[in-house]
Structures are given as C-alpha cells and as structure tokens.
Image: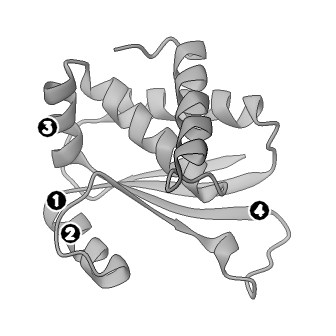
Amino acid sequence: MKIGLFKEVELDLEKELQEIKRVLKIGLKKLEIKKVEFNIIIVNNNYIQKLNKEYRGIDKETDVISFALEDDKTFNPKERVLGDIYISYDKAVGQASEYGHSLTRELCFLALHGLLHLLGYDHMEKEDEKIMFSLQDEILNEANITR
C-alpha cells in the first residue's frame, strides 16, 4: 500500500498527516484491501473551489473531493491506483470548530470519507449513507479518533 501525502498549503501538518495515514491503514485493513495507491492533497479553499467548479460545475468551496481513477475503464495498471483525495484545510479548520472536535479528527474523517468514495461507497441514497457513515464511524472508533 502506498499513500502519497501532499500539501498545497504552507503549514506544519506532519503530526496530522501521520495520523491520517494511520487511520487510512486501519480502514484498508478492515476492508481487506491490499496493494493500492492513492494520494491525499491538502489545499486551500480557493484551490478546491476551482476543482469543484471545473469538475462538478459547483462554484463554491467544499471540504473534500475525490477523483477515482478506477472510474476510467481505460486505466488498467498492475496495482490498484485508486485516485486522488483533495481536502480543503480551510474547511477542515472551520468544521472542526463548528463540530467541537480537533483538527486532526476532522482531517482524518475527511481523508477516510474521500477514501471510501474512491472505493465506490456513496451517500446519495439514505441506505447507502447509512452504510458509508457507519463504516466511517467504525474505523474512526477503532483508530481512537473521537469527537
């Protein structure tokens, strides 16, 4: 398993990035997924707003966007390359404050949420939302990432 962690913002996030990686490893193990690669890119609101507008047609910032390479049926590497997860640092800070938990918890939640999207989980329908959010809670609890 290879997880690329990148920052487009100039902040000291080493502790948070290591915690994100730990949580995602727990999630992949729980889901029995091996030999995968994906990237997590921490960006600011302006950057994620541009992505959201260009790829989703929504001209506003969001907290996390996932781009799944496996959606492209012409892409066929030897190992699973899942895609990229972009997280808005600005939104993560605001949401951590709004929900009354740590920035680390919010970043781990958003990264895990993005990973589950890369793996095909969705929350468009109520039943799918229940499955995805329950799985998120299970993994975060197993990793001792609480509110």
> Gap between marks 4 and 1, in whole Å?
29 Å
Q: Secondary structure at mark 2?
A: helix
Who is closer to the viewer here, 141 or 12? Answer: 141
Foreground: disc 4 or disc 3: 3
Who is closer to the viewer here, 136 or 37? Answer: 136
> Gap between marks 3 and 1, in whole Å?
11 Å
In the image, what residue occupies the spot 52% across and 57% down? 39
**Which residue in the protein does label 3 denote?**
94
> Gap between marks 4 and 2, in whole Å?
28 Å
Q: Secondary structure at mark 3?
A: helix
Q: Secondary structure at mark 4?
A: strand
> Gap between marks 2 and 1, in whole Å?
6 Å
Q: Residue 55, how many percent across, how many down?
A: 37, 80
Q: Residue 46, how many percent across, how many down?
A: 14, 66
Q: Which mark is residue 12?
A: none
Q: Which mark is residue 45?
A: 1
The amino acid sitting under disc 3 is: Gly
**Which residue in the protein does label 4 denote?**
80
The answer to whether marks 3 and 1 mark residues whose Cβ atoms lie closer than 8 Å is no
> Gap between marks 4 and 3, in whole Å?
33 Å
Foreground: disc 4 or disc 2: 2
**Which residue in the protein does label 2 denote?**
49
Of callouts 4 and 1, which one flags the residue occurring earlier in the amino acid sequence?
1
The answer to whether marks 2 and 1 mark residues whose Cβ atoms lie closer than 8 Å is yes
Hey, which residue is sitting farthest bottom in the picture? 74
In the image, what residue occupies the spot 82% across and 36% down? 32
